[in-house]
């Protein structure tokens, strides 16, 4: 059995120490468990402002987990600083998308960059889709591929988030239909533990570490009342991939102590 821990939206901000406390609690929780995860993924919005000091903190306190950690950018991240500080690489161009593939025994993880520099909504550039198609084409059809990015490719019933979802997703759906090895989409951005489908595949959204979105029926009439902050603990998802290829997801809240 393959087990992947899935975090999202840690929003590290040097001026908001609560974000650091919640991220540290989440990593400490994972490191305290008597289990070696196959991967820990963080699907975007690692930094709140995309600054190098924020990424330096993430490198020192998140990427140092005893489990292998893999990351992809969100709309709050900056591609150039993200790539330089977290991945130790210089970009071919400052705004080139940050796409990575992780190949392990029993699964493949494709981390796609759905961010659009300077905007909150998401979009997979042609370069990213071509890269993903190539990675899927070179993967045996019986080997599960999990595709991760920040922005959900479909609406989820939270109007504010739906307005800044991943657009142009019909291109991704067409790609998925060509590649049966694509098993599920893993994403963040929503700050809410959510499960739905897209292109006949599961879409599994990790809850926010820094905060939790309020659903429409949880909000008051105050237009600024759209998020739970300290009322709810940081949360994450665990994805279990069984030997027969079945995917199961559990969600957990993290004790802050």
Image (spheres, rainbow, N blue to C red):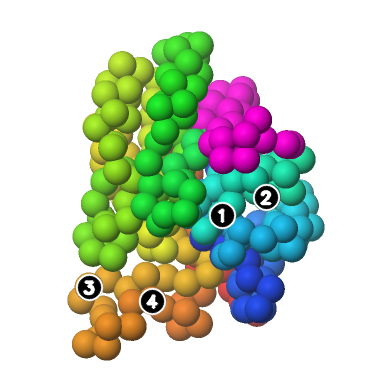
Q: Circles 2 and 1: CB distance less than 8 Å? A: yes
Tell me how far mark 4 sits from mark 3, CA to CA: 11 Å
Where does the image place residue 176, in percent across and percent down from the top left?
32, 25
Q: Which residue is mark 2?
A: 81
Tag in front: 2 or 4: 2
For residue 227, which numbered disc appears in the image?
A: 4
Looking at the rendered image, the quarter that the N terminus falls into is top right
For residue 55, which numbered disc appears in the image?
A: none
Tell me the SS state at disc 2.
helix
Sequence-wise, the earlier of marks 4 and 3 is 3
Q: Which residue is mark 1?
A: 77
Tell me how far mark 2 sits from mark 1, CA to CA: 8 Å
Point out the stretch of residues depicted in magenta.
89-110
Sequence-wise, the earlier of marks 1 and 4 is 1
Sequence-wise, the earlier of marks 2 and 4 is 2
Tell me the SS state at disc 1.
loop
Residue at the location (44% across, 46% down)?
Answer: 116
Residue at the location (68% across, 73% down)?
Answer: 14
Neighbours of disc 2 within 10 Å: few (<14), some (14-19), many (20+): many
Tell me how far mark 2 sits from mark 3, CA to CA: 35 Å
Q: Which residue is mark 3?
A: 216
Q: Is residue 100 magenta?
A: yes
Tell me the SS state at disc 3.
helix
């Amino acid at each position: 059995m393959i087990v992947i821990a899935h975090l999202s939206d840690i929003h590290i901000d040097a001026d908001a120490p609560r974000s650091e406390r919640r991220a540290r609690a989440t990593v400490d929780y994972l490191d305290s468990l008597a289990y070696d995860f196959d991967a820990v993924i963080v699907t975007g919005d690692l930094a709140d402002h995309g600054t190098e000091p924020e990424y330096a903190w993430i490198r020192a306190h998140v990427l140092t987990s005893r489990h292998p950690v893999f990351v992809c950018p969100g709309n709050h991240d900056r591609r150039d600083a993200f790539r330089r500080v977290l991945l130790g690489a210089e970009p071919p161009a400052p705004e080139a998308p940050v796409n990575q593939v992780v190949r392990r025994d029993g699964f493949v993880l494709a981390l796609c960059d759905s961010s659009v520099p300077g905007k909150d909504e998401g979009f997979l550039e042609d370069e990213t889709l071509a890269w993903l198609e190539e990675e899927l084409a070179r993967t045996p059809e019986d080997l599960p591929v999990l595709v991760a990015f920040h922005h959900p490719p479909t609406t989820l019933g939270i109007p504010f988030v739906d307005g800044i979802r991943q657009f142009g997703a019909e291109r991704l759906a067409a790609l998925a239909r060509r590649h049966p090895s694509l098993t599920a989409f893993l994403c963040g951005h929503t700050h809410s533990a959510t499960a739905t489908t897209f292109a006949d595949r599961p879409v599994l959204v990790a809850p926010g570490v820094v905060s939790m979105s309020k659903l429409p029926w949880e909000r008051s009439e105050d237009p600024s009342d759209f998020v739970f902050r300290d009322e709810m603990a940081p949360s994450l998802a665990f994805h279990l991939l069984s030997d027969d290829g079945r995917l199961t997801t559990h969600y957990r809240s993290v004790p802050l102590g």
